[in-house]
Image (spheres, rainbow, N blue to C red):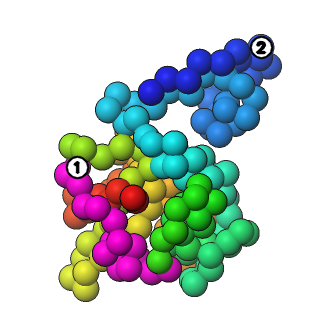
Amino acid sequence: MTVRMHMPAAVARAGTISALTLATVGATVTLPPGADASPVSATAVRIAASKKGAPYQYGARGPHRFDCSGLTQYAFKRAGRSLPRTTAAQYNRTRHIRAAARKAGDLVFFHGGQGVYHVGIYAGHSRIWHAPRTGTVVRLEKIWTGAVSYGRVG
């Protein structure tokens, strides 16, 4: 999905900036092919992106600190959808989809020996917005493992 808007010259000279910044100043935002998101999911991605740099804190649900499921819950709540608090509960609440069907705004669940242990919001190009762990901040990062599944928020 491409949203066309006028891009101010100052933004064009700024180089690489976030999609949220582009949308805020009225520029073109292009999602990757096949990554068209619903309005709710696209809003959730923008909200998660707006929290870039917020510190990780176990159990935190925002608006200034987050853990992984706190970030996804916060972003979707502000986008108009309710999600449960924990990663496992979010996994159980979403409609599971194949990797080939994933779109921006879908949830990405990470699996290990103890089950689902981490969640992020798919941003396209095999990247997620997430709050990784203690000592880190909310950030955009490439998916680092194949032990993931995808869920669509209804």
Between 122 and 151, the one nearer to me in the picture = 151
Is residue 65 visible in the rendered image? The answer is yes
Quadrant in the rendering for residue 9: top right
- Residue 57 point in image, percent of width and height: 62, 79
- Residue 142 point in image, percent of width and height: 40, 50
Residue 95 magenta-drawn?
A: yes
Query: Residue sitting at 47 percent across and 77 percent down?
Result: 84
Q: Which mark is residue 65?
A: none
Query: Which amino acid is tagged 2?
Result: Ala
Quarter of the image that includes the C terminus? bottom left
Query: Residue sitting at 68 percent across and 64 percent down?
Result: 54
- Residue 32 point in image, percent of width and height: 40, 31
- Residue 129 point in image, percent of width and height: 50, 55
Residue identifier under label 1: 99
Q: Earlier in the sequence, mark 2 or mark 1?
A: 2
In the drawing, does residue 126 fall left or right of residue 75?
Answer: left
Is residue 136 visible in the rendered image? The answer is no
Mark 2: secondary structure? helix
Query: Residue sitting at 39 percent across and 53 percent down?
Result: 106
Residue identifier under label 2: 9
Circle 1 packing at 10 Å, graded few (<14), some (14-19), many (20+), is: few
Quarter of the image that includes the N terminus? top left
Query: Which amino acid is tagged 1?
Result: Ala
In the drawing, does residue 72 fall left or right of residue 5?
Answer: left
Image: magenta residue range: 85-99
